[in-house]
Amino acid sequence: MKQANIAVLAGDGIGPEVMQEACKVLDAISTLYSVRFSLQPYLVGGIAIDNTGSALPDATLRGCEHADAILFGSVGGPKWDSLPPEQRPERAALLTLRSHFDLFSNLRPAKIYTGLEHLSPLRSDIAASGVDLVVVRELTSGIYFGEPKGVEGDGEEQFAFDTMRYSKREIRRIAVAAFEAASRRHNKVTSIDKANVLTTSRLWREVTEEVAADYPQVILEHMYIDNATMQVMRNPAQFDVLLCPNLFGDILSDECAMMTGSMGLLPSASMNATGFGLYEPAGGSAPDIAGKGIANPIAQILSAALMLRYSLNMEDAALAIEKAVVSTLASGVLTKELCNSANLHSAALTAQVGDAIVNFLIEGTTFNG
Ligand SMILES: NC(=O)C1=CN([C@@H]2O[C@H](COP(=O)(O)OP(=O)(O)OC[C@H]3O[C@@H](n4cnc5c(N)ncnc54)[C@H](O)[C@@H]3O)[C@@H](O)[C@H]2O)C=CC1
Ligand SMILES: CC(C)CC(=O)C(=O)O
Ligand SMILES: [Mg+2]
C-alpha cells in the first residue's frame, strides 16, 4: 500500500478550522485510493510563539524535513502584530519555511465556478464567459527577501528601506516553471513587471525573453503591473499564465481570488526543484471570521488536491477532489461569504462544506468504479 507522510501545520486564525476539513477529505481519499497518509500535526505561527517562544520550533522544521509534503494553514493575526517584523509569524515561520526548502515556484490557479458567476465583481457578461488562469509567482526572492533592509536615522529624517533584488538564475527558474505550465495549458505567458522604472524588471524581461526562445509554441507578452491589475478586471480571458515577481504576484493573486468570488476558494502550491512542496490557501488567517465555524475550507481542500498532484503523484485523487468541490458548489452548499443577503440564512458551516465534499467524493468515485 502506498504511504505518504504529511506535515500538517494548521497555524492561526481560521487555519485549524479549515485544516480539519482538509484532513477529513484526505481520510476519505486514503480509503478510496488505498493509500496510507500519516498526517502529523506540528505547531507553527503565533500559536507556536505562545507555546514555545518560536514561530517555527525545531520540532516543526525537523518534522517538515522528514515529510513527503507540507500542508499549511495560515499564520499571523492581531495578537502578534506588535512584534518586530523579523519575529512576526509571517516572516519567522512562513517566509523561513519557503526559504529553507527553496520553494521558489508558487502556483495559484484561479477560475470562476459554474453557479458562482454572480458573486464575481466582474461585469456579468465577462464573468459568464469564464476565467481560467494561473498565477506563477516567484516566492523566495525579490523585495520580501532582499538584503539590506532596515531602519536608520532619527526624527523626521528617519527612513526605512527594503531591497528588491533578483539574480538571472532566480528569474530563469521561475520563468521556466511558467513556460512549462503554459505548455500544459493554453500556450500563453504574460510576464508582469515594472520595467519602465525598476532595474530588476529590466533583467526580468531580458531573462524571460531568453527562456521564451526555448518554447516557440508559447506566446510571451510583457505587461506592467499597474496595467495588469486593471486588465484582470477588464478582460481576464486574455490571460493563461501570469508570471510574476514575488511582490506583484502576492498582490495580483489576491485580486484573482476575489474575481472568483472569495479569498476562500484560491489554493496554492509552493514547490522546489525536487518536487517537494508546501500547500496552502492563498489567503491569510482571516481573524475577522476565525473561531465562528464559517470560514470557507475549499482553498485548503484544493491545496491538499494540489499536494496530491504535484508532490504525491496522485493525479486521479486530485481530480476527484476538484470534481467534488465543483459538485458541492453547484449544489448550493456555500459558506456565508458566498451567499447573498437573500440566502444568508441557508449558509453552510465550514464542517458542512467539508462533509458535502466528502460525500460527493465517495459518490463520484464509487459511481465511476
Ligand atoms: N499565508 C499566510 O499565512 C498569510 C497570512 N496572512 C496574515 O493573516 C492575517 C490576516 O490578513 P488579511 O490581510 O486580513 O488577509 P486574509 O486573507 O486573512 O483576509 C482577507 C479577507 O478575506 C476573507 N477570507 C480569507 N480567507 C477566507 C476563507 N477561507 N473563507 C472566507 N473568507 C475568507 C477574510 O475574512 C477577510 O475578510 C494577517 O496577520 C496577515 O499577515 C496574510 C496572508 C497570507
Ligand atoms: C507573509 C505573506 C507574504 C504571505 C502572503 O500574503 C502570501 O503568500 O500571499
Ligand atoms: Mg498574499
Image (spheres, rainbow, N blue to C red):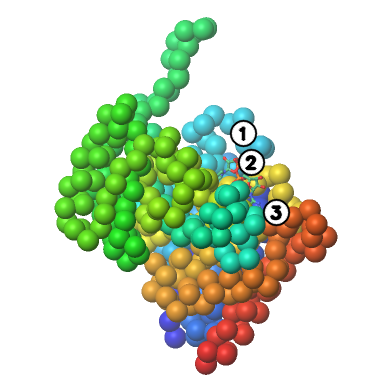
> Any atom of ligand 1 within 8 Å of the CB at mark 1?
yes
Cβ–Cβ below 8 Å for labels 1 and 2? yes
Label at residue 104: none
Q: Are marks 2 and 3 in contact (CB under 8 Å)?
A: no
User: Dot 2 corresponds to which residue?
Assistant: 77
For the point 58% across and 31% down, which residue is it?
A: 83
Which residue was labeled with disc 3? 337
Q: Quadrant of residue 362?
A: bottom right
**1 vs 3, front mark:** 3
Amino acid type at image mark 2: Gly
Q: In the image, residue 361 lies at what x, y percent?
A: 59, 79
Asked if the beta carbon under badge 2 is closer than 8 A to the nearest atom of ligand 1, the reply is yes
Residue found at the far bottom of this picture: 369
The Cα–Cα distance between marks 2 and 3, rounded to whole angstroms, is 20 Å
- Does any atom of ligand 1 lie closer than 8 Å to the CB of label 3? yes
- Indicate which disc, 2 or 3, sits on the residue closer to the N terminus: 2
Report the amino acid beneath label 3: Glu
Q: Determine the secondary structure under disc 3.
A: helix
Q: Locate residue 111, reporting x and y percent.
A: 51, 60
Q: How many numbered discs sit on the rendered protein?
A: 3
Nearer-the-camera pick, 296 or 131? 131
Between 57 and 121, which is closer to the camera in this rendering?
121
Would you call the spot at circle 1 few (<14 residues within 10 Å), some (14-19), or many (20 or more)? Answer: some
**Rendered residue at 40%/27% (across/down):** 162
Question: Disc 1 marks which amino acid?
Answer: Asp
For the residue pair 205 and 150, the one nearer the viewer reads as 205
Q: Quadrant of the N terminus?
A: bottom left
